[in-house]
């Protein structure tokens, strides 16, 4: 069932979102060659707990990190590790959730480590611009298919593919709520959007095939062809006056 948020709940979600967004910015500033993904995770954990919040992902289904940190052909759910050291040319996805006063924020951004390939730059751009195209369609009266179609249309123009096996989601008191928010769809189809809905919209964009698989660690999702993947996500609340992206801090 889709949970509609009232104004008091939206205010709390904005606080959870701000903490989430700040943690990503701080970790992003620390991205450089020689840094471990565990170091980034520590920065995120410190910021979230310092704010009086809790990392949403820590212990979720047994996940061992505070953030999901995925490098290059890892799409999502990478486990932070002190043995995973960033190197020049990598792209790193930092996906963070924070739980504060009963509500979650969820956001992800993809960062370049030093100089990256032109394809990597275009991939990062495609994830962000497809998100923005999706957000433009996220308004009361439209349907989820309008959002997904807008996202996939942009990604296809770049010549890339959207992951289909994993999708965005409703968010609020629970990290994952109804409805599913696919990054593909048919205009005019799907759940009708209305004010008070909170949706994590999160294009996962692959340079090659959309197909993915899970590593034996049970978490890390990788592209099947070993090509790069980028991810961009914000938590968004639909209002009559437009969309509030709670996790956008800059
Ligand atoms: Mg996320
Ligand atoms: Mg999410």
Image: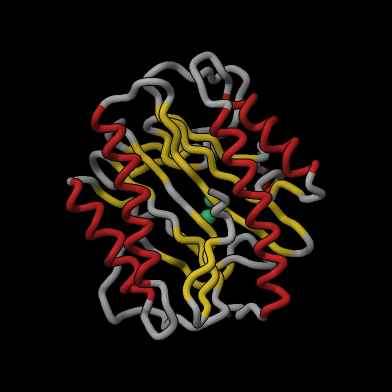
On screen, 38 above or below 12?
A: above
Q: Residue at x 40, y 37 (%)?
A: 222
Residue 93 percent location from the top left of the image: 47, 37
Nearer to us in this view, 127 or 221: 127
Q: Going by the image, does 170 lie left or right of 135?
A: right
The part of the image, by quadrant, that contains residue 5 is: bottom right
The residue at the far top in this view is: 34
Nearer to us in this view, 215 or 59: 59
Residue 73 percent location from the top left of the image: 37, 32
Q: Going by the image, does 170 lie left or right of 116?
A: right
Nearer to us in this view, 114 or 168: 114
Q: Residue at x 38, y 53 (%)?
A: 203
Q: Residue at x 47, y 52 (%)?
A: 233
Which quadrant, please, contains the N terminus? bottom right
On screen, 235 above or below 211?
A: below
The part of the image, by quadrant, that contains residue 15 is: bottom right
Q: Going by the image, does 31 lie left or right of 202?
A: right
On screen, 217 above or below 114?
A: below
Q: Residue at x 69, y 57 (%)?
A: 16
Count of numbered labels shown in the rendering = 0
Nearer to us in this view, 190 or 151: 151
Residue 223 percent location from the top left of the image: 34, 38
Coloration mode? secondary structure
Q: Going by the image, does 96 lie left or right of 42?
A: left
Residue 174 percent location from the top left of the image: 66, 64
On screen, 109 above or below 245?
A: above
């Amino acid at each position: 069932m889709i949970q509609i948020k009232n104004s008091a709940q939206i205010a709390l979600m904005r606080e959870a979102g701000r903490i989430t967004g700040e943690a990503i910015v701080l970790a992003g500033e620390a991205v450089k060659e020689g840094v471990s993904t565990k170091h980034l995770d520590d920065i995120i954990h410190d910021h979230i707990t310092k704010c009086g919040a809790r990392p949403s992902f820590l212990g979720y289904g047994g996940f061992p990190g505070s953030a999901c940190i995925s490098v290059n052909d890892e799409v999502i759910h990478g486990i932070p590790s002190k043995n995973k050291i960033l190197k020049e040319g990598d792209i790193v996805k930092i996906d963070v959730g924070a739980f504060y006063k009963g509500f979650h924020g969820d956001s992800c951004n993809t960062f370049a480590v030093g100089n990256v390939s032109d394809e990597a730059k275009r991939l990062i751009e495609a994830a962000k611009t497809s998100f923005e195209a999706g957000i433009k369609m996220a308004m009361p009266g439209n349907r989820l298919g309008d959002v997904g179609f807008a996202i996939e249309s942009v990604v296809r123009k770049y010549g890339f593919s959207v992951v289909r096996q994993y999708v965005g989601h409703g968010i609020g008191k629970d990290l994952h709520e109804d409805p599913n928010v696919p990054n593909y769809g048919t205009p005019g189809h799907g759940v009708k959007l209305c004010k008070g809905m909170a949706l994590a919209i999160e294009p996962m964009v692959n340079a090659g095939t959309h197909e993915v698989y899970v590593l034996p660690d049970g978490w890390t999702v990788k592209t099947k062809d070993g090509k790069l993947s980028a991810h961009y996500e914000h938590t968004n609340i639909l209002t009559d006056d437009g969309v509030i992206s709670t996790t956008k801090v800059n």
